[in-house]
Structures are given as C-alpha cells and as structure tokens.
Amino acid sequence: MMQSLTEEIQSFSRTRLRKQCTRVTSLSGRRIIETWKGSTITVVEESVLPEKMLGYVPDTSWDLQVGIVKPFLLLGSQDAAHDFGTLRKHKVSHILNVAFGVENVFPDLFLYKTVSILDLPDTDLVPYIQECCDFIQQARSEKGVVLAHCNAGVSRAPAVVIGYLMSCEGQSFDDALSAVKSARPASSPNPGFLEQLRSYKPPTTNGSKH
C-alpha cells in the first residue's frame, strides 16, 4: 500500500538532501563558492593555483574599504559588495547597486536594488536619485544597513549618496560632498554628475530639513 502524502513528508529528512555548490566569479576575477545543504549556506573563497595564473602579475588587491556616511548608509566598491565577510562585518542587510552590468552575488541573503547608471558626464543623474533615495529610506525604516556601490565606488555610488543627503537629509551640496569624501576619500563623481548635483533642487518634503 502506498504511503500517504503526509507520511512521505514526515519521513523526509533534510540530511538526505544533496549538497548544491555554486561557483561565483566576480568581474574582478575573485572566485567564491557557495555550498548549500538544506537551509544552511557556507561561503568560501576558492583558491587559484599559481600554475593556473596568467603570465603576468594581475592586480589582485581588493578595495574592501567601506565608508560610513550614516549608521544606516555605507559606501563602497563592487569588491566590498562581493565580499561576504565585509558585508557581514558591517551588518549590511540591503545593497544598492548603481553600476552597469555588475552582478548581485548573494540574492538570497540580502535585499538588492539595481539601478543601472552609466558613468558618463552627460548621463542624466537626477531621475535616478529619487529611486535610490526610496530604497535607502526603506532600509532605514526597516532598521537595516544599506551598502551603496558601483564598480569602483568612485563616481556613481558617491553621486547618488550625495543626492540622498541633499534630498532626504536636507544637506547643501557642499556639506553632502564633504560628508561623502570624508567617509570614502576615493569618492570623485565625474564632472557632469558634480554639476548636476550642484544645481540639484530636491523636491520639497516635510521634515527633510534640519
């Protein structure tokens, strides 16, 4: 006699689940292995044997410097966004990816928002600012910590964070730029973004000024 569905479910054991491995290679060449067994995930970095390296010495230095703009708002590069240890250390829960073509490598572990912005001086930045602000405010309301990143963490991510500080924190352009550069000295939005931010007039919202 066939088992009932309930009996089959009750006799099912998580320990019989086979492990599932996923290899993730970031755009900067780092390899991460995610191993799932049941509901448990293990994340390790895959080592590359020297003989498999190319005939030149690549730049393997990782930019894991994370700038703390606000307790709930961090700023960094894609390296930081792809480094599980860094994300865990900074208690990141939300990730704002404003790069173009940069993958979100931990979709099951963090809440992502992807806003693809081209790092060109003539890119119209302003329409993207509100979308980014809404996500940052969402993370803040959920008592989370959001990491804003682009590729190098130099132009696009700092630009939208400056826009957030102006729009939602009531800061002037100069104060917002200073705060971002203080948190992440490498920050240097392209000239077009700086010009747009300098003349940016945030929409009026109650209680945004202080």
Image (cartoon, grey):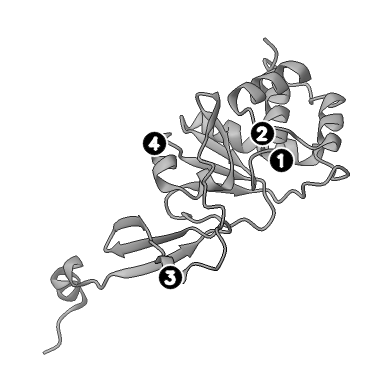
Q: Residue, x 43% and y 55% (percent of image)?
A: 108
Q: Nearer the viewer, residue 109 or 141?
A: 109
Q: Residue furthest top?
A: 210
Q: Residue, x 66% and y 25% (percent of image)?
A: 181
Quadrant where the C terminus sits is top right
Q: Residue furthest bottom?
A: 1
Residue pointed to by mark 1? 156
Residue 48, label in figure: none
Q: Earlier in the sequence, mark 1 or mark 2?
A: 2
Residue pointed to by mark 4? 89
Q: Nearer the viewer, residue 142 or 33?
A: 33
Residue pointed to by mark 3? 51
As shown in the figure, which amino acid type bears the numbered disc 2?
A: Cys
Residue 144 is situated, as x and y percent measured from the top left of the image, at 47, 33
Label 2 packing within 10 angstroms: few (<14), some (14-19), many (20+): some
Horizontally, is 68 left or right of 129 in the view? left
Tell me the mark number nearer the camera, choosing from 3 and 2.
3
Q: Earlier in the sequence, mark 3 or mark 1?
A: 3
Label 1 packing within 10 angstroms: few (<14), some (14-19), many (20+): many
Label 4 packing within 10 angstroms: few (<14), some (14-19), many (20+): few
